[in-house]
Image (spheres, rainbow, N blue to C red):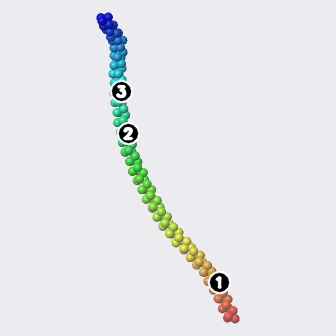
Amino acid sequence: MLHRMDMKDAMAAAMREYLLPELEGFKSGLVRITVDIAAINTRLDDVNQHLADQSRRTDAARAELNASINAVREEVNHRIDETNHRMDATNKRLDRLYEVIVRRDEHSAIVIKLNELDHEVREIKQLLAV
């Protein structure tokens, strides 16, 4: 039985001699990985906070830009309305001018016709006077 015990002790000693240094290497690697993961997590938290800050800034800039666009749109619409009113007034004046021109043309035609009739009346009077 002693021989078996010696073998068991020898095997345990050999395992300790070869496996324990490997396990220690794994443990130290695990510690390094844990430290690296903690550093990565810290960096990710910083990046996430930076992204959230950028998102807030983007939202604020978007709101400001939309307000500016709406103000410009209102101003342009107001100017268009003013221009339309001026165009309507100009069109009314042009319509009135057209009426005046047509009346003037009609007046000229009437004057010509009146002169023709006046001439005919004189001729008739001369014929009757003879």
Q: Amino acid at mark 2?
A: Gln
Pair 1/3: label in front: 3
Horizontal and vertical percent position of residue 123: 67, 89
Q: Is residue 58 left or right of residue 121?
A: left
Q: Earlier in the sequence, mark 1 or mark 3?
A: 3
Pick whichever, 124 or 102, lies toward us.
Answer: 102
Q: Earlier in the sequence, mark 2 or mark 1?
A: 2
Horizontal and vertical percent position of residue 73: 43, 54
Residue at horizontal 45%, vertical 61%?
Answer: 81
Residue at horizontal 32%, vertical 11%?
Answer: 12
Q: Is residue 104 left or right of residue 46?
A: right
Horizontal and vertical percent position of residue 91: 51, 67
Pick whichever, 37 or 59, lies toward us.
Answer: 37
In the rendered image, which residue does mark 1 sit on? 116
Q: Is residue 52 visible?
A: yes
Secondary structure beneath label 2: helix
Is residue 76 depicted above or below 110 in this figure?
Answer: above
Is residue 85 depicted above or below 60 in this figure?
Answer: below
Horizontal and vertical percent position of residue 88: 49, 66
In the rendered image, which residue does mark 2 sit on? 54
Is residue 110 depicted above or below 126 in this figure?
Answer: above
Residue at horizontal 30%, vertical 6%?
Answer: 1
Pair 2/1: label in front: 2
Secondary structure beneath label 1: helix
Residue at horizontal 40%, vertical 53%?
Answer: 71
Q: Quadrant of the C terminus?
A: bottom right
Q: CA distance from mark 2 to mark 1?
A: 90 Å
Q: Amino acid at mark 3?
A: Ile
Q: Amino acid at mark 1?
A: Glu
In the rendered image, which residue does mark 3 sit on? 37
